[in-house]
Image (tube, rainbow, N blue to C red):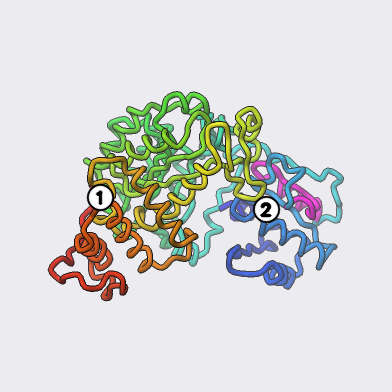
Amino acid sequence: MGLRCLRANLGEMRDCCALLEFDPRGSATQTRAEAILRRRPKIVGLGVYIWNASAMADLASALKARAPEVVVVVGGPEVSHEWEDHPATASADYVVRNEGETVFAALCAELLAGRRPGERVWDGGRAELSRVSPPYTEYSDLDLRARFTYVETSRGCPYGCEFCLSSLDPAVREWPLEAALAQFDALIARGARRFKFVDRTFNLSPARAAAALRFFLERMRPGLIVHFEIFPSRLPEQIKALFRRFPPGALRLEVGVQTFDADVNAAIGRRQRAEDVETLLDFLRRETAARVHADLLAGLPGGGIELLARDFDRLIALAPAEIQIGLLKRLRGTAVARRAAERGMRFDAAPPYALLESSDWPAEDLARVTRLAAYWERLGNRRAFPTALPLLWADGGSPFRALLELSDFLWARFGATHGIALDDLAVGLRDRLIEIGFARRRATEAVAADYLQGGRRLRLPPGLRGFTAASSRTAGAYE
């Protein structure tokens, strides 16, 4: 979305600007540089984010080495704060900080007029949205057909969570809603079916949220999906009533729980009540067809692995479709970054700058939780073993503790969290069930039935063969 915002605001220069996108995992730096330089550009702008920071630093260096006359401009969240020591700025001629729509256009105009401004850093500040052109005409038909279409109705967030970059932009600015909805209507007419709102808190203004929800309900058709990030404390009955009307599969909601603990929330400036979170998630599960993604964050100051265990157990009881366990990261410019020393925090120097240890989190605990999060993504969030996995805590124990011990077991066996075949994970889960006391036959049949659920697979891995066909059933949900 960021590149399209820039191109949409170039004015007369727009037609001589091309967008190029690369998968950071799928092509070498040299290949990307050659693809760019074949177009004989005068200016190359690179959008630098936490997920592509290393790739963009390498690309900037490669471009200047091959074509020193080309002006390289870097911008984006990664170079908007503490940019001086960022590797991506080392080879760049200019740095654009903060929102770049207006300032990038001004810089390009100077450069294309043959002038080389002496000021290396250009700060776009916070754009006045009524003066900015939205990016939606920049989406290609392929974008609309094959990707989520990113849209927004506001920028900024009033919640000052210390770990979040949005805390640096507390003044919420809103796009004119009627014009935004007309643009979304045009996107639907062009074939867009999957909308993801990047508003930091979609329901901050209930009236605007209700208008957007009604808009999509009036245009509901097979395949239309809308994804919102919501804050649990601002959900009036008007919004709930609209959520109830969405058909299965059409509404996806992201709820950033992070922690239920009041003291930890206070320590990081997060204004959230555990009761509001539970009420919201319970409502969504019982009364709507929404697919809910909920986040927990390991590494928060004042927390620890025991607190994370309580948070996870409390959350899994509320049965969201997905629970993501994230790891605290040092985002440049945030209060977490500024207060790292006083909290004994040590972060990885390489992106994504994950926490390595702190006063509350020993390194080994963080390593164990990181492994657990990876295994949980494969086994839990993807519903690979919806019947067999809960057997780990069928005795009434802590789901988190049971999963942590499974994670330790799998790590000891595989020494990796990625690149493991599902066949091997299935056998590993079966063996862990046997280790904690399940009969071999029962453990094997439970895992095998999940493995074959819904007819998705026709053959069992060798380690699970021999279970009876009668036990092959379609598995139920976690709850």
Mark 1 element type:
loop
> What is the three-letter code of the residue carrying label 2?
Leu
- Crowding at dot 1, Cα within 10 Å, few <14 / some 14-19 / many 20+, comes out as some
Instruction: Please give left or right for residue 393 compared with residue 58 in the image.
Output: left
Which residue is disc 1 drawn over?
A: 478
Residue 399, located in which quarter of the rendered image?
top left
Instruction: Please give left or right for residue 147 compared with residue 34 in the image.
Output: left
Q: Nearer the viewer, residue 102 or 199?
A: 199
The reply to whether discs 1 and 2 touch (Cβ–Cβ < 8 Å) is no
> What is the three-letter code of the residue carrying label 1?
Tyr
Magenta residues span 88-111
Q: Nearer the viewer, residue 248 or 270?
A: 270
**Which of marks 2 and 1 precedes in the sequence?**
2
Please provide percent x and percent y for residue 209: 39, 38
Mark 2 element type:
loop
Q: Is residue 36 magenta?
A: no
Looking at the image, residue 364 lies above or below residue 261: below
Please name the residue shown 54% across and 40% down the image.
328
In the rendered image, is residue 101 in sight?
A: no
Q: Nearer the viewer, residue 36 or 145?
A: 36
Looking at the image, residue 426 lies above or below residue 128: below
Circle number at residue 10: 2
User: Which marked residue is nearer to the observer: mark 1 or mark 2?
Assistant: 1
Instruction: Please give left or right for residue 449 compared with residue 378 in the image.
Output: left
Please provide percent x and percent y for residue 168: 60, 33
In the rendered image, is residue 248 in sight?
A: yes
Q: Nearer the viewer, residue 123 or 369?
A: 369
Please provide percent x and percent y for residue 352: 60, 49
Please name the residue shown 69% across and 45% down the image.
79
Please name the residue shown 28% across and 50% down the image.
392
